[in-house]
Image (cartoon, grey):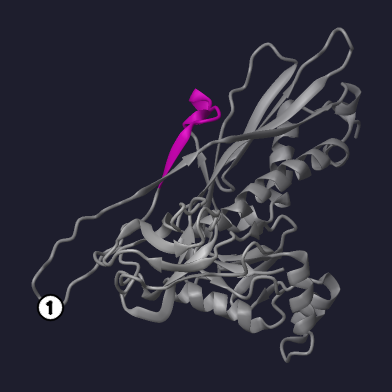
Amino acid sequence: MANTYLTISMITREALRVLSNNLAFTRGATTEYNDKFGVEGAKIGTTVNVRKPPRYVGRTGTAISIENATETQVAVTLDTQFGVDLSFSSADLKLSIDDFSKRFIRPAIATIANKIDNDGLKLYKKVYNTVGAQGTVPNALLTYLNAGVKLDDEATPMDGQRNLVITPQMQATIVDALKGLFQSATAIADQYRSGQMGVAAGFNWFMDQNCATHTIGAHGGTPLVNGASQTGASLVTDGWTASTAVLKEGDVITLAGVNAVNPQSRESTGVLRQFVVTANVTSDGSGNATIAISPSITTGTGFQTVTGSAADNAAITVSGTASATARIGLAHHPDAFTLVTADLPVPNGTDMAARANDPDSGLSIRLVRDYDITTDLFPCRLDVLYGWAALRPELAVRVWGS
């Protein structure tokens, strides 16, 4: 059958399909598409509110005790418009969609997918639970099982949707370490042929070369909590090395005597609560510093995070070696992170323009082609507009690498 000209709608739908299939980390996150922008259009800076489920304390006995349904939201800013610019001729539109996709769409979409995944993996800075040793590639399954324990302690659903996204070296190391274990012959054969873990230890495993790298702050001194009974998202401290960039956004600290609690039972997990530093910290000339942290120190209500506040002069421990650098994998449930996309406006007066969206995948993409009479070329652009946010960071765990 003779080829007919490809339409702009066919090309845009194919671009959306290829984008969905090229995503790695994003595929294991929650994705949201807001259809109101199909009419209004969207631009950089648009904010979308994503709801978080309420949490209740419950009661004991027969007397009713009504609790307020406090439904919180996370504001997601569509702060990134990213695209690839290319050109194709009218003659190229006589290709089959498969040939056109191979020559033009797939290389362009690979760049877009790489950017989206890269940005999403930077959300490790919002994650406070960690396992493994900074600077060491895990070579035993126990490290990853401990990530599962952390998720269990945070009441993460055991619904078959727990994911592990690790670096190429982390993947190679664990596949080699497990090659002799007794398990399904088919599973071992799949690991040997593909060099990938697949499904194991309660996780769906993925390799992503975009896994982020973190450099720890200089810390130094003998840091202590300055004042008892502190609560909230900041902590007053002292004892640091004076006038030093002691902590960086994404560093993890613990406070002596402050344990984590299970969010459902509010019972102690028996391990120290880990807090992530949410902004860079520089000590003053006397070694004092106020640290912005997550989660907030909350000692009551249905959102309790700790067994109690830190005592005055409680010791502060920073995870990892001062000023060292390491790559980070992520164990997470899809509800830990969310990607929001929206429709960009389709301009009039161009050679061709269209957008495609898919509420199921939560993705939207726009394609615009114009004609330049001075050069006799058809410049073309593919664009996506999106924003990332940590929706429920307690449902994720960092895995330290090297």
The location of residue 87, given as percent across then percent down, is 84, 25
Residue 201 in view (yes/no): no
Quadrant location of the C terminus?
A: bottom right
Which residue is situated farthest in the bottom direction here?
182
Q: Amino acid at mark 1?
A: Gly
The one of 370 and 177 positioned closer to us in this rendering: 177
The location of residue 16, given as percent across then percent down, is 69, 40
- Secondary structure beneath label 1: loop
The quarter holding residue 141 reads bottom right
Magenta range is 36-50
Which residue is situated farthest in the front direction here?
285
The location of residue 333, given as percent across then percent down, is 53, 64
371, above or below 333, in the image: above
Seen at 71% across and 72% down, the residue is 198
The one of 86 and 34 positioned closer to us in this rendering: 86
Q: Callout 1: 10 Å neighbours few (<14), some, many (20+)? A: few
**Label total for image:** 1
Seen at 35% across and 79% down, the residue is 268
Residue 32 in view (yes/no): yes
Residue 168 sits inside the magenta stretch: no
Which residue is situated farthest in the left direction here?
63
Say left or right for 402 vs 377: left
Q: Which residue is mark 1?
A: 61
Which residue is situated farthest in the top direction here?
374
Seen at 53% across and 59% down, the residue is 334
166, above or below 347, in the image: below
The quarter holding residue 261 reads bottom left
The location of residue 354, given as percent across then percent down, is 67, 26
Seen at 86% across and 26% down, the residue is 88
